[in-house]
Amino acid sequence: MRGKFIVLEGIDGSGKTTLAHTISDAVGGAELTFEPTSGPIGSALRSGAYGDIPPAAEALLFAADRAVHTRQIEEILDSGRWVICDRYLGSTVAYQSASFGESADWDWLLGMQKKSVITPDLTILLDIDPEVSMARVSRRGEELSRFEKLDFLRKVRSAYLRLADILDYQVVDAAGDEKQVAETVLEIMRKKGLYAPQ
Ligand code: TYD
């Protein structure tokens, strides 16, 4: 049987990584993947090797990284294992539309990925006020990247919420404690037949 594909979206510090582990434990083990990937394009994006590039180039590079990743995801799903992916196509729409600002073209951001993505069985959007998530990120002692500026993250958050309507994301309030967020997500999964509590 083909595995299930679950995607976690949300701004930096929304708790995706912790949640990925919780869901994996609940379903008896899943493959945890993330974007940008650790492959050549993803690593270069992460390290800033491309420098200050236009948002369109950024969007295309993230999408190319995803296209390569998607084939790996399909192989895992075909082998019957589940995949929980930290960020997927929504990240490019939310972050790069924020980078474009007024000139953002949503049809393009979504359309150019059409041939290179698959539809997840479930996408969870961990919704949180950037002020709260940024406080979490700085507590973790991580260096703030240019993606992590407050104003920018506000735009990303509203793009995510708009996208949630278009792509049927399940929006979960991520400001609560980890346990509460996990319970909400597992209940969503139970309702969708993706999780059966023992
Ligand atoms: P992130 O998941 O935060 O990696 P890490 O936690 O290891 O730093 O991803 C790095 C940044 O890349 C993040 O701020 C969001 C940004 N990003 C985009 O702008 N577009 C995309 O399509 C993806 C996948 C990520």
Image: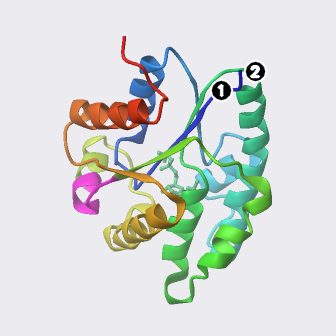
Secondary structure of the residue carrying tag 2 is: loop
Distance CA(mark 1)–CA(mark 2): 7 Å
Seen from the viewer's position, the closer of residues 176 and 27 is 27
Q: Is residue 186 above or below residue 126?
A: above
Please state the extent of the stretch shown in magenta in the rendering.
127-134
The quarter of the picture where residue 56 lies is bottom right
Q: What is the x, y in percent for residue 145? A: 45, 58
Is label 1 in a helix, a strand or a loop?
A: loop
Q: Which mark is residue 79?
A: 2
Side (left or right) of 103 relative to 98:
right
Q: Position of residue 117 (x, y in %)?
A: 72, 52
Residue at 48% from the left image edge and 23% from the top image edge: 24
Q: Does the numbered disc 1 mark a residue whose Cβ is under 8 Å from ligand 1?
A: no
Binning the other alpha carbons within 10 Å of mark 1 as few (below 14), some (14 to 19) or many (20 upward) gives some
Mainly helix, strand or loop, the magenta region?
helix
Q: Is residue 89 above or below residue 165?
A: above
CB atoms of marks 1 and 2 within 8 Å: yes
Which residue is nearer to you in this view: 53 or 66? Answer: 66
Specify the amino acid type for callout 2.
Ser
Question: Looking at the image, is mark 1 or mark 2 earlier in the sequence?
Answer: 1
Residue 82 within the magenta-colored segment of the rendering:
no
User: Residue 87 location, x and y as percent?
Assistant: 54, 48
Q: Which mark is residue 95?
A: none
Answer whether residue 133 is magenta in the image.
yes
Pick the front one: 75 or 186: 186
Residue at image location 72% in from the left, 66% down from the top: 60
Does residue 53 appear in this view?
A: no
Residue at figure coordinates x 32%, y 68% from the top left: 150
Residue 104, quarter of picture = bottom right
Q: Which residue is mark 1?
A: 3
* Three-letter code, disc 1: Gly
Q: Residues within 10 Å of mark 2 (few under 14, many from 20)?
A: few
